[in-house]
Amino acid sequence: MKSHSCDLCVVGSGAAGSVIAHRAARRGRSVVIVEQGPYVRAAQMNDAEIEMIPRLYKDGGLQMNTSMDMFILQGACVGGSTTLSNMVMMRAPGEVLDEWRRFGADVDEAALSHSYQVVDDELGTAEADASTFSGSTRRFVEGARALGLSPTRMRKALGSCRGCGNCNIGCSFDAKRSALSTYVPWAEAAGARVLADTEALRIELVGRRAIEVQARSTRTHEQTRIAARQVVVAAGAIGSSALLLRSGIRRNVGTRVSFNGGSMVIADFDEPLDAYDADQMTWCVQGDGYIIEPTHNPPMSAALTTPGWMGQHVAMMRRQRHLAYAGSLVGTEATGKVVHSHAWGHEETRFQASPSVLDKVRRGLKAAAEVFFAAGARRVILPTHRFRSITSSREIDEIDRHVVSTKRISFGSAHPQGGNPWSSDPRVGVVDADFAVHGTDNLFVCDASVFPSCVRVNPVATILALANCAAARIDARA
Amino acid sequence: MRLQSILLRTLPLPPAGHALAESEYRTLVAIAGVLLPGAEREVPPEDVADNVEAFLVRGRSRRAWRIRALLHLIEWLPVVVYGRPLTQLTPEQRRELVEQHYIDGGGLWGICAKVRYLVLLGAYGDARMHVATDYVPVSKRRRFQQRDQNGNGASVTP
């Protein structure tokens, strides 16, 4: 049994945990970061998806909802999901912040806006560099403009990115400004200690006070106790709720889970685009209830998102040079739930996409297909399990006919949110204005799990900014 | 005693260092052979199964038992149609099974269909597929051959 003691124990080293740990360490507090996943530095990364995905993703990349019709992708490594993300720095829309306020969240818009700016400055957020645009994205932008749409160049925190296209398996160039290459090492330089490969099992509470985090090495199974004056749970949506549930904190925990859920269409062009050799994601089109994000993946991930069976799938993969992918990203309602399954011994995520979500997904897919046809695509392949393609925009209504259930299409999310909703009202929320768990004095939660409803854009900037706000509030209660 | 523990005790034991028992491995090879017609030139079904197994070992997923349970379902569910398990069907019967039951299948057949993802990751995660997909890995792209001024680069070749 190992033991540590510190002023602040942070569970999770992703976007929120790393910022909070850095701020506390910078102020001279002793900080221990507990991270379930491994510490994989840039020099240890390579371009083999089949090696990197099981090392860096939660549950080896196999996480799904209970009905098994949605993949849920999250990081489980030092840096959390930022290590795998595209670092698209979008700010939460005003109407989302209004929703959160109506739910009882203490959203100080001026402070949040300042925090967005602080993290943008620290990470060097800038418009995606034109030299990193892929051939498929260029065609997408041409098509969107031809239709009179207004595509937007994404703002990203990619540092000196050269556009290798491997953002989702870690940045071996150490260019991407993920928590792995910024806030975590900054926190360590200020004295914070990272316990990687260490799973927080439960938080021990005495009355209103958290006194220690009980953890276990995922490699040796050796037990570790971390006594702390304050504990911050930042294990991500799903993981943070699961830890609270295991610690006996149940009121409202696991509720209001939402996702940016998505599905993709694929356009087939006559000429080669070689989309893999560029930044995966640089432009988007905002629609009514959806965002279209053209993207591309290396072959293994591309194979998993490419429809068709047997010969049709093999034939599609042999046309990879000519293919352009675009996702329709839709914010879901907060109807999901994280539960701890005693039968199976781990957490489960219950979620079913509503007809309204599917309608928005369809509209996004139709808009993406229109854009690709306007850009000269010879056919567009639908995301249905059975291979289906259309050859002109006159056939676009086929999407309405065939995209009717998440059980019949490829559907997934890399942006789970909610589970520990932020509200001053303890009847509905888990954390209060200071991100403290209701009914406790020194136990806090800050990450995407506190979002009371879906943020509906790529969430990393909002998680970082909220963590910057939370760090000051947590410090004030030290 | 958890359901998971009970289930794991009923499943055959994988050899040391492996994620799959031998029977589960054979089922995976049998279905991989059907799902990747033509691709076996690059990655034979046995190698697809090896890659999947290595993936599961590396991932240390607490949900890996589901994959094992899935493979048993895939092996035995064909009994209701053909009276024989998957590995005893002819390649033609396996193809027919996928076409008629997996692709649009609901219920247990729909769950069986998830094996497609395993087979695809085992096949396309293999570097031998790069030529067939016209993919050049970062470590072999000319513009990344030279390390940058800070000495950073895609230094590890898979």
Image (cartoon, coloured by chain):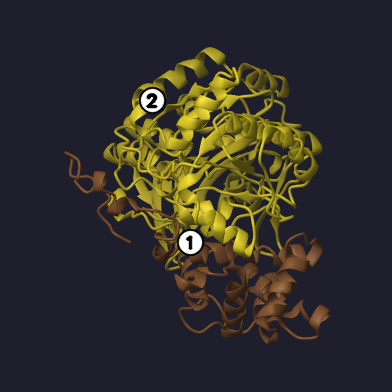
Chain colours: A yellow, B brown
- Outermost residue, right direction? B80
Q: Which residue is mark 1?
A: B124
- Depth order, front residue of A430/A271: A271
Specify the quadrant of the image occupied by residue A343: bottom right
**Residue type indicated by callout 1:** Tyr
Q: Which mark is residue B54?
A: none
Q: Is residue A243 above or below residue A130?
A: below
Q: Nearer the viewer, residue A456 or B62?
A: A456
* Any part of residue B2 in sight: no
Left or right for B40, reference A103 = left
Query: Label 2, label 1: how many angstroms apart (C-alpha)?
Result: 34 Å
Residue B33's image quarter?
A: bottom right
Q: Is residue A394 left or right of residue A25?
A: right
- Return the mark for residue A125: 2
Number of other residues with Cα within 10 Å of mark 2, as a class: few under 14, some 14 to 19, many 20 or more: many
* Marks 2, 1: nearer the viewer: 1
Relative to A230, residue B2 above or below: below
Q: Callout 2: residue from which chain?
A: A
Q: Disc 2 residue type?
A: Thr
Residue under the point 65% across and 80% down? B91
**Which residue is most to the top?**
A110
Report helix, strand or loop for mark 2. loop
Quadrant of the frame with the C terminus of chain B: bottom left
| Residue A161, image x, y percentages | 32, 36
Percent from the top left, x then y, of residue A264?
61, 42
Viewer-proximal residue among A9 and A361? A361
- SS under mark 1: helix
Q: Say whether residue B86 is visible.
A: yes
